[in-house]
Image: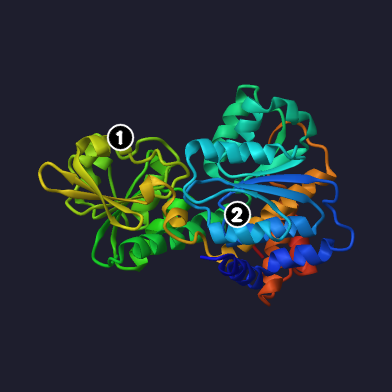
Amino acid sequence: MSRQDGDRRIDWAEEHMPILDQLIREGQAHKPLKGERVGIALHLEAKTARLALALRDLGAEVAIAGSNPLSTQDAVAEALAGRGVHVYARHGATPEEYFGYLDKVLSHRPTLLVDDGGDLVTRLHLERPQLLADLRGGAEETTTGLVRLRAMHLAGELKVPMIAVNDAKMKHLFDNRFGTGQSVVEAIMHATNLTIAGRNALVVGFGQCGKGVAQRLRGLGARVGVVDIDPVKMNEAWLDGYDVGTMDELAPRADIVVTVTGAIRVVRREHLERMRDGVLLANAGHFDVEIDKQALRALATGVETAREGVERFRLADGRRLYLLAEGRLVNLAAGDGHPVEIMDLSFAVQALALLHLAANRLTPGVHPYPDELDARVASLSLAARGIGLERETDEQQRYRGTWREGTQ
């Protein structure tokens, strides 16, 4: 794709992100981020470009790197660089290039951060601690990233305030469930050109992301099984009507396996050895560690590219196991990521987090997302779609505030 294609993609995203547009209109005159330097590590595609441009329009100097070597869309990166944003990313970056791009973002001495998975924050602490004094704080949008940040905080190593954007209701209830559900299944279909209906699908991990994936797979006609280590979530999956069990029980029956845990090696050698011929292996967790790629290569007598983004691993007994997107985030490495309207919600949450950090001095540590900002995004979303909201009457407010009234 050319830069012109990248511009078109950004323009399309802009047309369908009314909440960010409203925030820009509100801040256009006084530029609330004037003087701030924002460093970003996110999946660099059109919706992310729109966030970067919104922060620029609110007054910030913006530098951005990709948060995944395979999710960067080069045409979008080129178009974004032509619009006044410092861009350091390319599709297919080597590990050395990937971390080098993060270092280039940090070389701008950011005062605010937007991170996805925690790599930018940990790089700052481990490699550039001298820059910590400039930093007012940041926002982390993933479950995986928050696990890392909370571990840093417990160890006494987190030196800056970080807002837990992933915990915002207007993020995880919609982005994680509806965004991940649609984009993961869409990417699998695009990468393979195979049917979902009639297949046995296994979703490993039943958090909000896993719930969305399971729901969409079942909606397309798959028979869906669920594995989780949390007994509460397993009860929920069972009462939702999914097959539930262990990996040993369900993995050998699966035609499609999607990992959504944030953990390491949830699909291991003992599972791969018993999987069906033709199984599709996809990861929707943050890093490429959920499917044991080393074990998969050790079992294979040959590895070939079956389609773009699909590797065929031939085993000695003739079975073929297919790994999608190198085991990286399938919805971004083999697709366009979450729907535009969903990311409008998530990136409005991000933008308001940065505005909050710019206006307030927070102590180092992981901070909850403020409820009033969550409510504001929700209200802006309804207004943008022309949806009315019922209001509580004075009588109802009084009733809710008393304990004396009950059965009449």
| Horizontal and vertical percent position of residue 123 | 61, 32
Residue 171 got which mark?
Answer: 2
Residue 91 as seen in the image, left or right of residue 260: right
Task: Find out whether the residues at labels 2 and 1 contact each other: C-beta distance under 8 Å.
Answer: no
Q: Nearer the viewer, mark 2 or mark 1?
A: 1
Q: Is mark 1 on a helix, strand or loop?
A: helix
Quadrant where the image shows the C terminus: bottom right
Taking the image as shown, residue 323 lies to the left or right of residue 261, namely left
The picture quadrant where one finds residue 362 is: top right
The residue at the point 40 percent across, 61 percent down is 187
Q: Which residue is nearer to you in this view: 352 or 301?
A: 301
Q: Where is residue 89 in the image (x, y as percent from the top left)?
A: 57, 48
Q: Earlier in the sequence, mark 2 or mark 1?
A: 2
Q: Where is residue 325 in the image (x, y as percent from the top left)?
A: 38, 51
Residue 266's spot in the image, x, y percent? 34, 38
Q: What residue type is labelled 1?
A: Gln
User: Which element is circle 2 on?
Assistant: helix
Q: Please tell me whether residue 255 is drawn above or below residue 15 in the rendered image.
A: above
Q: Is residue 9 left or right of residue 198?
A: right
Residue sitting at x 74%, y 38%: 137
Q: Which residue is under mark 1? A: 294
Point out the residue furthest to the left here.
317
Q: How far apart are marks 2 and 1 (CA)?
A: 34 Å
Q: Which residue lies furthest to the right in this view?
A: 30
